[in-house]
Amino acid sequence: MAKKNEQELAKALEKIAQKGITADRQHLLEDIGAQFADYREWIREYVVNAYDAGAGRCKIWGEEDNEKITIFVQDDGHGMDRDRVVDFMTLFRSVKDGDPRKAVGRFGVGKASILAIPGLIGLAMETSTGKEGWKMESCSLLDAKPVQIRRMENPGEPGTTFAVSYRKKVSLAQELLKLGDVLSRYLRYLPMTITVQNLASFQPGGQNFRYINDQWSAYRERVGRKYTFTINDYSFEAILGIGKGSQEIYQNHVLITDKYDLFFHDWGKSVSLPKLSVRIDSPDFELPFGRHGLRNEEILNPLSEYMRETILPQYFDELYDAVQRQSAGDKIEIYSEELENLAVALLRYDCDSRRMWSRLPMFNVWGAEQRMSYLQLHDLAGQKKRLYLEDPNNPGADYTVFDAPVLMTIQPVGTFDLLQKHFGPLLVNLGDENMVLEQTVTGNRKLTSEELSFESALGFHTDTLARYEPDNEKQTDSLRSLFDSPDGAEGLFADLVKLNNLSNEARSARTDLEEIEWRVNYLVERDGVTPCRRQKYLYTNNTVVLNLYHPEIRKLLELSKKVPALAGHWALAMCLQDSRKILSHLTPEAREELIRLDAVVRSQYVNKPPKKTPQSDRHSEGRQQFRDYLRMLAGRSGISDNIIQ
């Protein structure tokens, strides 16, 4: 609503800009002064007025006494005849010659910027067109007292000189220095010569004026490039370069603001692009009175999208070409480290394979003949399902035994944040003292057929549970026969069948548990070689790997030779009871339900008639173990941590 009201006010002011207004001067005085965050910005407005009056030079100097400071602003512009002097003294009246789009001041309020000065004493002016000259003095620009305008007998050369007096707070030398800083910030690219008296380093007979001007040119930037384009009938000129990382908006080469992100404004958040500087000029930017932002901010959404999607890739390609030319002997415009740091920042939001920054070889990898690009790392991470980060405290490690890329600690700035963002679950930090790894494909320990058979018994698959629905008479009888004994088998069977009616939490978690992959392997310490016997299993990337080096897992392996279903179930129960890792969001009650459900599902495997083999007695013993275990579940006695002891 505030923005809408401001736009409506601006339109109304444009309509009266040729007529001016004279009512309610005091309130206007207060409101206009409040538009300027820094009262010294008045000097910007008066120099801009000189530029609009056709001046090629503007000189600022001052005088002081014990009470006040007087600043003089002198230009060689067209000067003012009597009508123009009256225009100047009329609020919101601003008559410009030529194309109004090329004028910097548009509403005629810049002259009133001195109202922001605390302790303003007065304003005086001498102006000449070369044919007629006029003098004016006022205690305040907009007070109700009559302003005396007197004709000058000798008009002199064309131009205008203002004298602004206000109470002294700092020395004249300090005041001029600060006024010069304001001009340098806002008007350094204004195409006119601006000089400010320099009293801070005054030398008799020396050059005692500070020159403000700089050239609006891409060549003023390192690897500077200029781009002109049109968006929705709005015209823009953008200059990109490597510098301090500023993003500035200009109108007719006068700085308006640097508070907007010109690449990500449409995202609603800012993204840091190190050392990348940009300044954009457009006559179509609409300004509030204090020039502290844009009135038509909506223009920034299509602008930032175009800068990000079109200009930025073009400019990065030119930076890459500049680095390549340097390697061929050209002078250094940009260091390769700067290009790589920028590429890492760009990859945080855009890793499209078409972008040069995605294909730039810049990541240091152990054992690689050359550095890898983001796309190469992405492809390898997809194949290997992991990326390793070097242990900086183990310089003698042999990284050739690892089955995926090992990234060095020396990388472009921001690399590890980038890797965490894109590859977080796949990153293995070898610097973690508690790190445990699977043996790599280069390891000497291969899985035996018995170990692979044990692996096939792992996992959680409840699709077979449908076979035990009460309306399936044949399978119901089959399950009941498992508990055919004189000690209350009917109650045991009924209790187990009820497990199909899970709580909402356990029912929801069934799918999550079914999606976990289960494997066996030999785990090693973070050096990739030393056997690990302190950890039962490894859980990463939704995969459980049982450690065949661990004594308890070896016992489960032996049990799997007798009754695979029971060994697989106990492995699941052991891991699922570790609430710190697997499905950490579940309550203990839901975990218990899933464990009991798994026991019911696996019971089908031990109820099949044994084959006539010499091992029949062992299998029979295993089935009896499972029967006893299921009875224990039915009795809700829980599962002990040392169940397999």
Image (cartoon, rainbow, N blue to C red):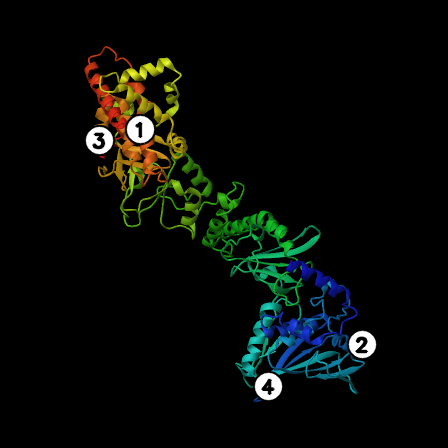
Where is mark 2, residue-wise? 83
- Distance in Å between CA atoms under marks 1 and 3: 15 Å
- Report the amino acid beneath label 2: Asp
- Work out whether residue 30 or residue 277 is closer to the camera in this orientation and state it: 30
Q: Nearer the viewer, mark 2 or mark 3?
A: 3
User: Residue 530 location, x and y as percent?
Assistant: 23, 39
Which quadrant: the N terminus? bottom right
Q: Please state if 428 lies on the left or on the right of 241 as rendered.
A: left
- Distance in Å between CA atoms under marks 2 and 3: 103 Å
Q: Give SS at disc 3.
A: loop
Query: What number is the disc on residue 384?
Result: none
First of labels 1, 2 by sequence position: 2
Q: Please state if 339 lies on the left or on the right of 457 as rendered.
A: right
- Work out whether residue 520 or residue 1 is closer to the camera in this orientation and state it: 1
- Report the amino acid beneath label 1: Arg
Query: What number is the disc on residue 596?
Result: 1
Which quadrant: the C terminus? top left
Which quarter of the picture shows residue 549? top left
Q: Residue furthest bottom?
A: 66
First of labels 1, 3 by sequence position: 1
Query: What number is the disc on residue 68?
Result: 4
First of labels 4, 2 by sequence position: 4
First of labels 3, 4 by sequence position: 4
